[in-house]
Image (cartoon, helix red, strand yellow):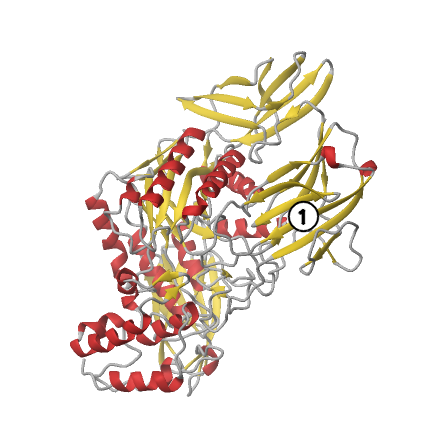
Amino acid sequence: MRQIINFNRKWAFTKMADAIPETMPAKWDIVNLPHSWNAIDGQDGDNDFYRGTCYYAKQFMKASLPEADRYYLEIKGANSSADVYVNGKNLAHHDGGYSTWRVDITDALDLNNLLVIAVDNAANETVYPQMADFTFYGGIYRDVNIIAVSESHFDLDYYGGPGIAVTPVIEGTTAKVGVEVYVTNKKDDQVLVYRIKDAEGNVVGSISSEDTAALFEIENVHLWHGRKDPYLYTAEVALVEGETVVDAVSTRFGCRSFEIDPENGFILNGEEYPLRGVSRHQDRWGFGNALLPEHHEEDIELICEMGATTIRLAHYQHDQYFYDLCDEKGLVIWAEIPYISKHMPTGRENTISQMKELVTQNYNHPSIVVWGLSNEISIAGSDEDLLENHKILNDLCHEMDPTRLTTIAAVSMCPLTDPYLQIPDVVSYNHYFGWYGGDTSMNGPWFDNFHATYPNIPIGCSEYGCEALNWHSSEPFQGDYTEEYQAYYHEELIKQLFTRKYMWATHVWNMFDFGADARNEGGENGQNHKGLVTFDRKYKKDSFYAYKAWLSDDPFVHICGKRYVDRVEDTTKVTVYSNQPEVELFANGVSLGKQTSDVHFFYFDVPNAGEMELKAVAGECTDESLIRKVEVFNEDYRLKEEGAILNWFDIDAPEGYFSLNDKMSDIIMNPAGQALFGQLMGGMAGKKAMGFEINESMMAMMGGFTMLRLITLAGGMMDMKFTKEQLLGLNAQLNQIKK
């Protein structure tokens, strides 16, 4: 019978070794797993986090292991390439940092053993990801186990899979459940005993057979129905010899049917079930991606509190524990591989192996409905090799799993005519109109145009969002990084996206702020701040409650702007979110009136004099906040980027004339502005943003940026630096151009 021994404790670790040690290193650091060596430098900005090979070593006696025929080392996540050595012998190499993989170490074991794992997150043109807007944390950042098994055992070799696959098919009120197992070295006298249990532990079916597949029928089946009823069955299979259980495996599964309709969106068990939710990265402040179970649990609880029905688990395979939580909570999942941003002709085999691992390891999760082939992969354009890679992956997914659909997340500037959009079963687009260009009003019409052009292709929005830190304004504007603009942005996007029934799924980018060491913007370097919740999970931004108002059935009311206390205006706007039909707001005990709203957003004009205690009442729910009248704007609320050479409020902007604070799209509509912009663009020609050449399509997408913001981003993303004098000179030229 298999035994699993956790191997997380007391590893020796170093970045400095030149070779694999022959004996247990005495001077290396001692760490416990999960562990990342980029927990700090991967989150502090400047894109200077350590990327290279590091070493983990652990000494153990064979006698400390249970008696068994075979011993497998199980590594649940090591980013991004790794080699396993036992007693100096190289036993395995693995490429791909987000999946489980195993190594049979039996024949290399001695009485006393030295296990060394070399992990490498350096640049590599054959392993994905290599170019993306998140930190590629290095380390063994998930659990490591030793699995002790008999010579006959359920498979441990095939792409890290569980050795069991369950396929439920719904026919009316009956589920036909196929259970298939994969057995290594099965003997003729060994029998397989299959059992299906319901959620209460009752046996609802049992079969003994020599065959490695069995078919059950569950009458009056209890369906897995998302957040409403995430009911789970369990399949157990024992390998029995005589009276002895040689090995056993089990897996939970859910019985459900679904389809994605181009007019009616996602349909679960014959019922329209709108997928409205978020994307998630797997990292934390101070931990990198070395998450503990309690971190996963907190994340899922926050997502559920918001009322989401779906999660896009970007941009790679996540921890099995999190998929388990999604099954339990009823979240509908988009699972994908890190085939992202930059197509590498030399990386095809890695996309195939990572997809095989993703599908094999996650086949039994009822929460997963689509396999994601790629993300923004055509940002530099598509070619025949890229198209062929997608066709191979698409066919592979359908071959390995005919029960689920395939999808892609297309970059905003990808033309609707790009043939790679025709490859997957359903399509989603990443759009940031209102943040990275354009304005918020463009989002809904863009999807309407796609839907009208391709009425038979289900379309969704796989990314949209805007950054917010602890900056505040009563007059928020695009690109100011204030919590107020983020709230406004999401109000507008909610109204546009959630009311379009045909959109099969929408995923906010992102549920949580996350590490992106290449970013130096917003006043806090090293992070992407588009999260609805802060990186440390301690603060829910106002936009979190905008979604809760639309998606959650739990009664609540929330006053926005709690961090924005000091205000200069005599009358200030206060926004309240609630899922209740009516809200009343009080200021120092005096009612400012009652409001109703079909969109769950309530706006009050509040007199601002002295200190005002605000109280919102919605049914039985209340919330309180405070505002205070000040004569001078509190500069603690204003973005001042560390090391910034020029801020927007320092720029001369004479009325009727252009300045660096104007949008590029407005500037280039003016002939003189266009000529000046052409000079700037000429300076950018051939430059690369995050590894990609700046082309006409990318520049067009950035039309909603202010000139200053574009230049600021250019400094962070490209090898371009502007002095204060240069910027002031450019602004002076703009000041001469009449609007």
Front residue of 551 and 167: 167
User: Mark 1 Cα within 10 Å, few/some/many (few <14, many 20+)?
Assistant: many
Quarter of the figure with the N terminus: top right
Image location (x, y in percent) of residue 517: 51, 64
Q: Residue furthest left?
A: 671
Residue that appears at 47% across and 51% down = 125
Image location (x, y in percent) of residue 221: 47, 24
Residue type at numbered disc 1: Ile
Image location (x, y in percent) of residue 102: 63, 37
Work out whether 80 lies above or below 71: below
Specify whether residue 311 is in view.
no
Residue labelled with disc 1: 117
Specify whether residue 388 is in view.
yes
Q: Quadrant location of residue 488?
A: bottom left
Element at label 1:
strand
Front residue of 223 and 15: 15
Quarter of the figure with the C terminus: bottom left
Work out whether 70 lies above or below 469: above
Left or right: where 22 falls relative to 655: right
Numbered-mark total = 1
Image location (x, y in percent) of residue 115: 73, 45
Work out whether 664 lies above or below 528: below
Front residue of 11 and 536: 11
